[in-house]
């Protein structure tokens, strides 16, 4: 858990959240601001749109910890806003809502259009609303309502106010909790060269996990073994190299099947190592031939003395999943699977380092599907119990 502080609707808020908690979940579950609605949870429908540092953004694809120090405004925070008052009246007059599910995000987007594009016509308004989906109104009333406010403000002589664009805006570097096991990502990413086509490329991940373990081998020996890419690759369950490594570039495949979840990713990665700092980074990208999903990932590791003739290894995995598999991105099962794969990799790597031979077989118990389901159910009950308290 990470402590975060930010301003929400003009009020200073402090709380704790897991690094994977989206801003929308933090607003709804922790602050009880349920005016922010969640539907697609992939940044597509626009129902969760809020303002972050004055710019409209999807709260379902922004992490709460990444908004450290930001100013967030939800639909509940526009009580004294003049433009929003005009929009609410126009939406009512033009019958611009039916079920109302999309309305909070629609209003925030409409306010951005009115302030940023005072001369917009109906066609431009429709284009600007393309990122906000409504399944009941047909958009006609919404467009009329926004055009009405545009005409009213033009008659008042109101000027345009530059506004931000939709997207993951306002993200800031979150403070790292002392309880986190992984090495600070900033210390590791400095070792990686600029590879625009691989890794996250500055995008926010939607899957993260971190772990640390100690092996009873000297640091120099562990560092040398980690440079043997084929040997290390055999420690990853389901991973195979499809071409010999060359100049730090690796081509391979990762196939994993756990119950209903099956993947067969093929892709490329670049491995960078920082010799003085004894840390490294793998930046990769791949595509799943089974679902058509794509993934980008950054895996960082750092070595440190762990005692007499022992080495501590900190590993952090940050991945961005897109496509059909991204629908499971918030699933406790997928999060659990990712954590168990990382733990299984650590187990096999540790056994290889201490045994001096190739990696042992994968542990079937580590990937048992019912164990993942049980862990997800248990976590849900723990979450409900925490809320009840």
Image: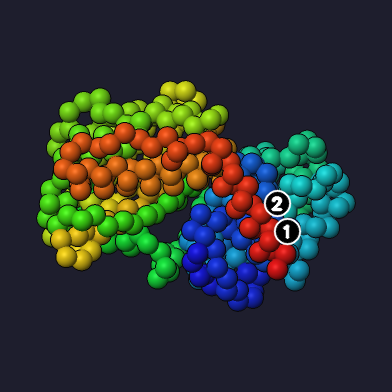
Nearest the viewer among 24 and 222 is: 222
Image quadrant of residue 232? top left
Spatial CA distance of label 1 from label 2 is: 7 Å
Please name the residue that numbered disc 2 is placed on.
37
Residue 295: % across, % down: 42, 37
The residue shown at (76%, 36%) is: 135
Residue 136 x/y as whole percent: 80, 37
Local secondary structure at mark 2 = loop
The answer to whether one can see residue 146 in this image is no
Classify residue 265 as left or right of residue 353.
right
For the point 80% across and 39% down, which residue is it?
137
Q: Which residue is mark 1?
A: 34
Q: Is 269 located above or below residue 330 in the figure?
A: above
Front-most of residues 31 and 169? 31
The answer to whether the residues at label 1 and label 2 have Cβ atoms under 8 Å apart is yes
On the image, the x and y values in percent for residue 129 come to 66, 43
Local secondary structure at mark 1: loop
């Amino acid at each position: 858990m990470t402590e975060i502080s930010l301003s929400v609707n003009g009020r200073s808020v402090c709380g704790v959240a897991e690094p994977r908690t989206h801003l929308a979940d933090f607003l709804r579950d922790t602050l009880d601001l349920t005016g922010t609605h969640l539907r697609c949870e992939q940044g597509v429908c626009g129902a969760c749109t809020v303002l972050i540092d004055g710019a409209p953004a999807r709260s379902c694809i922004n992490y709460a910890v990444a908004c450290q120090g930001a100013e967030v405004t939800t639909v509940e925070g526009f009580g004294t806003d003049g433009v929003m008052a005009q929009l609410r009246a126009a939406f009512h007059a033009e019958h611009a809502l039916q079920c109302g599910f999309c309305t909070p995000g629609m209003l925030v987007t409409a306010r951005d259009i009115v302030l940023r594009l005072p001369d917009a016509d109906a066609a431009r308004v429709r284009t600007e609303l393309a990122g906000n989906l409504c399944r009941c109104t047909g958009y006609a009333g919404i467009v009329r309502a926004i055009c009405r406010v545009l005409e009213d403000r033009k008659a008042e002589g109101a000027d345009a106010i530059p506004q931000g664009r939709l997207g993951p805006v306002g993200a800031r570097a979150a403070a790292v909790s002392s309880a986190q096991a992984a090495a600070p990502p900033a210390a590791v990413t400095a070792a990686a060269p600029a590879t625009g086509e691989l890794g996250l490329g500055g995008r926010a991940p939607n899957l993260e996990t971190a772990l640390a373990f100690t092996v009873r081998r000297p640091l120099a020996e562990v560092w040398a073994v980690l440079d043997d890419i084929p040997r290390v690759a055999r420690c990853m369950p389901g991973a195979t190299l499809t071409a010999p490594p060359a100049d730090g570039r690796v081509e391979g495949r990762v196939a994993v099947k756990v119950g209903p979840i099956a993947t067969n990713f093929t892709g490329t990665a670049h491995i960078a190592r920082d010799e003085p700092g004894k840390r490294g980074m793998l930046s990769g990208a791949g595509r799943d031939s089974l679902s058509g999903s794509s993934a980008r990932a950054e895996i960082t590791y750092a070595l440190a003395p762990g005692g007499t003739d022992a080495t501590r290894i900190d590993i952090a995995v940050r991945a961005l999943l897109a496509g059909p598999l991204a629908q499971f991105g918030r699933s406790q099962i997928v999060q659990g699977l990712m954590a168990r794969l990382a733990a299984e990799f650590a187990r096999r790597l540790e056994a290889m380092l201490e045994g001096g031979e190739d990696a042992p077989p994968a542990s079937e118990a580590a990937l048992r599907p019912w164990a993942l389901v049980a862990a997800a159910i248990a976590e849900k009950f723990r979450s409900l119990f925490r809320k009840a308290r």
